Image (tube, rainbow, N blue to C red):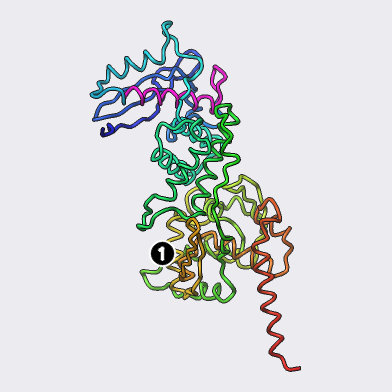
Amino acid sequence: MRLKKHNISYRLDNRLDRNGEKAIMIVLTFRGRRVSVSTGVRVAPELWDQKAMRPKKTAVNHDRMNAMAIIADITSKANILEDVFSSFPSPTTEAIRTEYRRRVLPETGMALLTPIRPKTILEWMDVFVAEMSVLREWTDATREKFAALKNHIAAVDPAMTFEDLDERGLTRLLGHFRSMIMSDGSVGMKNSTIAKQYGYLGWFLNWATKKGINSNMAYKTFAPALKQTQKKVIYLDDDELARLEAADLSAPNRRHLVRIRDIFLFQCFSGLRYSDVAHLCWADIKDDVMTVTTVKTNDTITIELNAHTRAIIEKYRQYNFPGGRVFPAPTNQEANRYLKELCRLAGINESVTVVSYKGKERIDEVRPKYDLIGTHAGRRTFIVHALSLGISPYIVTRWTGHSSLAAMKPYMDIVDSAKADAMKLFDSKTK
């Protein structure tokens, strides 16, 4: 049976009540028709984010429902409306509205005070995403990760409940990951990708357990054999940095790479993540010090300017970009694409072997280094060079915002290896 195409959105009613609040409405659109129904939940207009179609993070309504409670309630009502819509072979607007009211409103005609809980994992995941998007201010990329996980769960069993995620259910999901056809035509996810999927699932299940929704603890002890290698740290050495800085970008078809080179070099000499460089404002820079509240962790870090970062910033002082931003940063996806093009032009093409596993099968891929360069390589380059200069790992973590020295270990291993290679230069000296 083909699923009926439809869309769900939220808006506020036009009428204010005596408390200065408006009812949150659910709008179902299908085949050019629209059904608007009330959730029975109200919120002040100034506490409603019209673009995101959800209450603002700080919202609390007259009934003392905070943003998370409001989101959980209206999401559960939207699930009911979805069920109503799918129950009709040929739905009409009036039939949908009548059945929705029958399910949501008791005989008194008053809205239920507590939301009707969705039953399936997919329905609860909608609540989780809606709630955490507000609470943690998720990026689109994070929401996309859970949308992908939902698709995987739906492929195994769209009616799956928490009780189904026992050892057998988790193994069924593993079987799906290992047998699915990938975009390149190969069969099965790499072990590292599967581990990430279980990580996202664990995040969701921890939330559900804390909420008292889930009591199935099988996921905490489920440990499939997923052989992996330590992820290779991709960074630029001194020679590669010099080649990148010297690359001729004067041709008209290369000028779009000038700004991405400046931004990437700024990362290499500051240690900032790309998201933080993209959000860097002139107001964040005072007295040769940057004070940045990071996008990823919401930590506030201070980083002193050096000759390299100061020169790059001064180059952009003449511009007036929206929001007082320092740089005209493209999206992270565009930046990664431009960086690969830039590094290829700069001759950063050393062959790099990348080792991964699918099940027990070891996969060795030899790729040019420029193909492995992304925006995060700038941050890694900064860390490796800082440690190579003898700067204390503790000071480096103060600049990068890493929570522990353990995060420095892969970089310190690289530095130790470089020191050992340098010592071999003495072997060539005559006795």
**Residue 49 in sight in this render:** no
Q: Is residue 146 left or right of 310 when viewed as pictured? A: left
Q: Quadrant of residue 120?
A: top left
**Which image quarter is the C terminus in?**
bottom right
Q: Residue at x 25, y 24 (%)?
A: 89
Asked if residue 158 lies left or right of residue 353, the reply is: left
Q: Residue at x 54, y 48 (%)?
A: 224
Q: Residue at x 53, y 25 (%)?
A: 69
Question: Observer-nearest residue: 182 or 237?
Answer: 182
Q: Which residue is mark 1?
A: 256
Q: Which residues are magenta?
A: 60-85
Query: Residue 186 in the image: x percent, y percent?
Result: 38, 57
Instruction: Give yes or no for residue 78 being in the magenta stretch.
Output: yes
Which picture quadrant has residue 75? top left
Seen in the picture, residue 123 relative to 146 is either above or below; the reply is: above
The quarter of the rendered structure image containing the N terminus is: top left
The image position of residue 397, as x and y in percent, is 69, 56
